[in-house]
Amino acid sequence: MYAGQQTSVTAGLVAAPEPTAIPAVLARKSGRLQYTGEPLQDVVADLNRYSAVPIEVEGAAAQLLITGAVLEHDPRGWLEGLGKALPVDITFGEERIVIRGRN
């Protein structure tokens, strides 16, 4: 393995080294989750690790592509802005947050 590469270990198997996005790795270490063309459902899966209330994505909204950064300590703030940037409606409930595509 060389500088600028990463690998992973799962069940004792080591994956082949591959290039890594150094800025994204550094951002994550500083509390910023960085995404480039990631499906919203994947971003939400990450955010659920930091959100006090479970976040769900329904329908076609799950496949909307996200590029940007989210602060680990403020997933709700990012979600509030998401409804302004993408054609989605977000319902904030006490037991769950739901993201739906806007018709």
Image: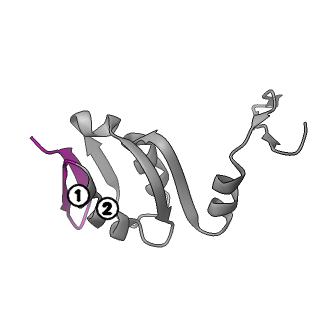
- The quarter of the rendered structure image containing the C terminus is top left
Taking the view exactly as shown, the residue that stands out farthest to the right is: 2
Query: Which corner quadrant of the image does residue 94 belong to?
Result: bottom left
Name the amino acid type tagged 1.
Answer: Gly
Vertical comparison of 53 with 34: above or below: below
Label 2 element class: helix
Instruction: Check disc 2 and give the amino acid type.
Output: Leu
Residue at figure coordinates x 72%, y 42% from the top left: 20
Is label 2 in contact with label 1 (beta carbons under 8 Å)?
Answer: yes
Reading the image, the residue beneath label 1 is 83
The way the protein has been coloured in the rendering is one colour
Residue designated by label 2: 79
Question: The magenta stretch spans which residues?
Answer: 87-103
The picture places residue 99, in percent across and down from the top left corner, at 24, 50
Tell whether 9 sits left or right of 89. Answer: right
Q: Looking at the image, which is closer to me, 3 or 61?
A: 3
Nearer-the-camera pick, 95 or 66:
66
Residue 101, given in percent of the width and then of the height, sits at: 18, 43
In the displayed structure, 66 sits above or below 26; it is above
